[in-house]
């Protein structure tokens, strides 16, 4: 006889044992985050000291960069090991990693999502080219982000004469997932959510490991009232359901049916870019577009290209994708990165990463923290702080073309965009174009082996990756090549006899759209 699976959050988290390996879902900014359950875990630990020594696994970033999401797990003693795809949403967890209070690992988001499927299927792990030549390659750091992390999560193997990375399977004891509706039998619908992410894969990994699946939803419904095609996680693999009537789409967004894809609506245009320098970079990157291209945008200045597409009503010219599993629509930015208004399709996150890993993307617009002479890029560890790439590695390594978008330097720089060009008033104190990156998140060598293109767009200059090295192809009007570019870099690029000048109209547009930085 089937009994009701509805429980309070307190009853649900009391089932989590010390030392458990817990898989979490979420996508930053509150997207698909089971906040009520996370808060209950934190309360239980602070009140009772249990559970202790958890291993926490999360593919995407989870949090608000303040107190929510992974920050609820950032108590010394609550977690022993964290395997995360993106850490920047949780400064408290970053601090625990920096201070050697936990074992800190980073693996690519897509690989973690796909690994859940292999765990569920009883396979030894995920075998993939993603991560070769980067910091997750065991010949480098093997995904270890601090001294406390000594585990061997990844190995290099050769299959059929092809070198691959083996991301090893491990049991999942608990999965904490989220949906919109649930019945007493535990059937879960995601109909009013902004994405599917890795909800099903994480739940199945836990169930088939003999573990526990806890689902948080906003609304309880009668048994047999959910259409079968609306059920994305069957009750057969769900153990406990927690109802949170205050559940929101994001921390700031209660509910919007145009974001869940239930209906279309007028485009919600993203706010205009307030930095003329960032606007200039986005406008130059926009020139790399071609009609019919399948696109992806990363957090940061790459979002500016999505802004331009929305502002100019160009959405019908391209196929826009988000790694969370969403296609089409108007992409939202900032704290709502990962959300899209009026999307055309939503699929599961692991399947979206299959699409990326197999080379389905034409162009990706991504940020960069550091770049060196070999075309290697670092976004995963900056200034000794664990950041993590999120879906960056899965996307950048496999897109046919990557356009890296970022300022030429960082920390205190001052450049003014005028209709006539760029005036550099003060250089930043941190170089981003360096002799060697602190950590390799994108391998220029691997990109060349795969025949992919890479372009680097900054406000002062544009570079292209070649087999001979990084080539300086364009310079901003008003910029002195030697003083403002070459002397501010940690390496000497290949320089054609006369680098082109960036299109002057870009500066007119950028100067008009925003105040100088």
Image: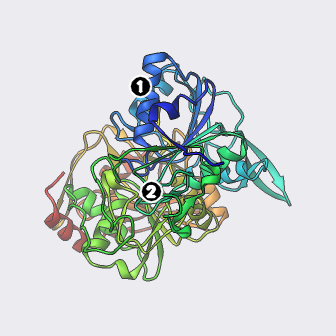
Q: Residues within 10 Å of mark 2 (few under 14, many from 20)?
A: few
For this orientation, the residue located farthest to the right is 160
Q: Horizontally, is 307 left or right of 356 in the view?
A: left
Q: Horizontally, is 219 left or right of 512 in the view?
A: right
Q: Secondary structure at mark 1?
A: helix
Q: Which residue is mark 2?
A: 221
Q: Nearer the viewer, residue 292 or 344?
A: 344
Q: Which quadrant would residue 114 be assigned to in this image? A: bottom right
Q: Which mark is residue 43?
A: 1
Q: Secondary structure at mark 2?
A: loop
Which one is earlier in the sequence, the residue at label 2 or at label 1?
1
Q: State the image coordinates of residue 264 (x, y, percent, origin top left).
A: 32, 75
Q: State the image coordinates of residue 342 (x, y, percent, origin top left).
A: 35, 72
Q: State the image coordinates of residue 236 (x, y, percent, origin top left).
A: 65, 53
Q: Residues within 10 Å of mark 1 (few under 14, many from 20)?
A: some
In the rendered view, how is the structure colored?
rainbow
Q: Nearer the viewer, residue 517 or 185?
A: 185
Q: Are marks 2 and 1 in contact (CB under 8 Å)?
A: no
Q: Nearer the viewer, mark 2 or mark 1?
A: 2
| Residue 136 against residue 309 in the figure, above or below | above
Measured in 3D between alpha carbons, the distance from the residue under mark 2 to the one under mark 1, in whole angstroms, is 28 Å
Name the residue located 43 percent from the left edge and 18 percent from the top edge: 47
Q: Which mark is residue 370?
A: none
């Amino acid at each position: 006889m089937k009994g009701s699976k509805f429980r309070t959050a307190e009853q649900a988290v009391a089932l989590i044992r010390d030392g458990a390996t817990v898989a979490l879902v979420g996508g930053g900014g509150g997207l698909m985050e089971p906040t009520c359950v996370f808060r209950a875990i934190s309360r239980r630990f602070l009140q009772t000291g249990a559970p202790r020594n958890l291993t926490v696994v999360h593919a995407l970033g989870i949090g608000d960069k303040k107190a929510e999401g992974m920050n609820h797990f950032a108590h010394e003693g609550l977690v022993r090991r964290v395997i995360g795809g993106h850490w920047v949403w949780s400064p408290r967890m970053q601090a625990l990693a920096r201070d050697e209070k936990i074992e800190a690992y980073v693996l690519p988001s897509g690989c973690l999502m796909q690994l859940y499927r292999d765990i569920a299927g009883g396979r030894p792990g995920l075998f993939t080219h993603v991560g070769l030549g980067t910091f997750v390659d065991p010949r480098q750091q093997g995904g270890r982000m601090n001294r406390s992390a000594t585990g061997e999560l990844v190995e290099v193997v050769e299959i059929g004469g092809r070198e691959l990375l083996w991301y090893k399977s491990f049991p999942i004891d608990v999965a904490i997932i989220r949906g919109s509706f649930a019945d007493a039998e535990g059937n879960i619908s995601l109909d009013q959510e902004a994405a599917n992410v890795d909800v099903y894969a994480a739940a199945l990994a836990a169930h088939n490991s003999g573990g526990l699946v806890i689902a948080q939803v906003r609304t309880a419904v009668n048994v047999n009232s959910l259409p079968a095609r609306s059920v994305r996680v069957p009750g057969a693999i769900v153990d406990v359901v927690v109802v949170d009537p205050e559940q929101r789409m994001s921390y700031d967004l209660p509910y919007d049916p145009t974001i869940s894809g239930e209906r279309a609506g007028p485009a919600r245009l993203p706010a205009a870019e307030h930095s003329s320098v960032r606007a200039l970079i986005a406008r130059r990157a926009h020139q790399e577009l071609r009609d019919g291209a399948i696109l992806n945008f990363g957090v940061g200045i790459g979002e500016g290209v999505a802004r331009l597409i929305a502002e100019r009503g160009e959405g019908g010219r391209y196929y826009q994708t988000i790694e969370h599993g969403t296609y089409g629509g108007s992409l939202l930015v900032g704290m709502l990165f990962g959300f899209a208004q009026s999307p055309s399709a939503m699929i599961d996150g692991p399947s979206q990463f299959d699409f990326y890993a197999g080379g389905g993307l034409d162009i990706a617009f991504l940020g960069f923290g550091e770049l060196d002479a070999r075309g290697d890029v670092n976004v995963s560890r900056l200034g000794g702080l664990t950041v993590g790439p999120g879906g960056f590695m899965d996307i950048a390594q496999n897109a046919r073309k990557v356009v890296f978008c970022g300022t030429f330097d960082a920390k205190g720089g001052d450049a003014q965009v005028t209709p006539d060009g760029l005036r550099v008033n003060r250089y930043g104190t941190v170089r981003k174009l360096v002799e060697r990156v602190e950590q390799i998140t994108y391998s220029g060598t691997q990109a060349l082996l795969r025949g992919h293109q890479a372009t680097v767009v900054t406000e002062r200059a544009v570079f292209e990756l070649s087999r001979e090295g990084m080539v300086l192809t364009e310079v901003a009007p008003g910029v002195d090549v030697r003083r403002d570019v070459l002397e501010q870099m940690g390496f000497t690029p290949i320089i054609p006899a006369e680098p082109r000048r960036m299109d002057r109209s870009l500066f007119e547009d950028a100067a008009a759209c925003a105040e100088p930085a």
